[in-house]
Image (tube, rainbow, N blue to C red):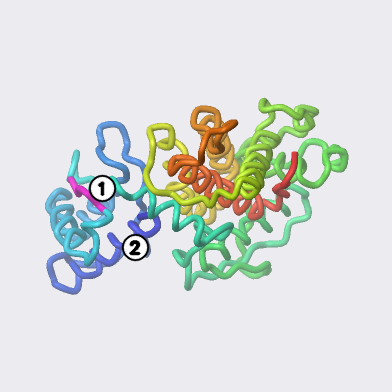
Amino acid sequence: MTPAELSRTVWHAVCRAVEDDALPGPVPDRVTVERPRPGGRGDYATNVALRLAGPAGRPPREVAEILRVRVAATPGIDRLVDRIEITGPGFLNFTLAPDRAPALVRAVLRAGTRYGHGDTLAGTATAFAPAAEPRAALWTRTVMELLRAQGGAAATGTDGAERLAVVPVADPGALAALGPDAARWALLATAARDRPYTGPGLFVQRESNPLFRTRYAYARTRALARGAAQLGIAPAYTAPEPTHTTLLTALGDHPAVLEAAARLRAPDRLARHLEHTAEAFLRFQETARPLPLGDEKPSAAHRSRLALAEAAGAVLAGGLSLLGVDAPEHL
């Protein structure tokens, strides 16, 4: 179960509680699910009960219990969520079922580069003011793509249009020397409030360069796929190993990252997540060999690792595409 799916499940539980008169309205536009804060438990948590407590005139923990019961009653939820707990002043914490990894990998492979696209912002329409400054113009176009990937409508307009405030690039002339991919990464990977780096470090072809590391990780997933094809090994994810944990977490977080990047007008969040996913993949392939060596026979473990590598490649390619950066097959 992805964070976006869990968010929708909790939101529907809120709707049912309001319809049943167990909880006075209003129903929020969306429910945010994220990694638990220090002191929390499980895989994901939401503060929706704290947000609803004031308007409902109920203690937050009482609201959380009302929602916990309704989420637990969702058909099929027991196969996806192992535990639903209430912590602190009223946080709902979710521990996913232990067999979620195969379903997650299958979901990524089924969606391919569109994994994480959804309809969380369906029904919303945003007009953005045209921008002439290079970074503001690119930031606007990229945010529009992110919104569309979440089902929202986005276009440029004039009357009442939203203007994205970003620190401009210090030397626009330096962008041409970088080339299109490095230039886009430079302008998007830095938070809007910070001045982007456009120096020679973006040319360095080693893992100290985040752009190179991210694209190199994708190229490695394609090399593994070619090697598997030559050996006649079909990827098939069956069970996680300890070395898979960090990479699986990064893949599971991807839909929530895309939604947050769109909603908060923050493509830099996506860039940082791609860096993290690339690092997780590179560590994974170093500690768990996806391809057999020498006369070693292919095993279920190899097929699982290859499927996980293919899923990582889909996330990296899809994320880079949304940023307008090329994902090379060879690097």
Say which amino acid is labelled 2.
Arg
Q: Position of residue 201 (x, y in %)?
A: 75, 27
Q: Main secondary structure of the magenta part?
A: strand
Q: Where, quadrant-wise, is the C terminus in this rendering?
A: top right
- On screen, residue 10 above or below 180: below
Residue 176 image point, x, y percent? 87, 43
Any part of residue 165 in sight: no
| Callout 1 amino acid | Phe
The image quadrant of residue 249 is: top left
Q: How many marks?
A: 2
Q: Position of residue 241 (x, y in %)?
A: 39, 36
Nearer-N-terminus badge (2/1)? 2
Q: Nearer the viewer, residue 196 or 41?
A: 41
Quadrant assignment, res 197: top right
Q: Are marks 2 and 1 in contact (CB under 8 Å)?
A: no
Residue 173 visible at all:
yes
Q: Residue at x 31, y 42 (%)?
A: 43
Name the element at disc 2.
helix
Residue drawn at point x = 68 percent, y = 62 percent: 129
Q: Would residue 119 be counted in the magenta stretch?
A: no
The residue pinned by badge 1 equals: 94
Q: Secondary structure at mark 1?
A: strand
- Badge 1 crowding class, 10 Å Cα cut-off, few under 14, some 14 to 19, many 20 or more, is many
Which stretch did the figure color magenta? 81-85
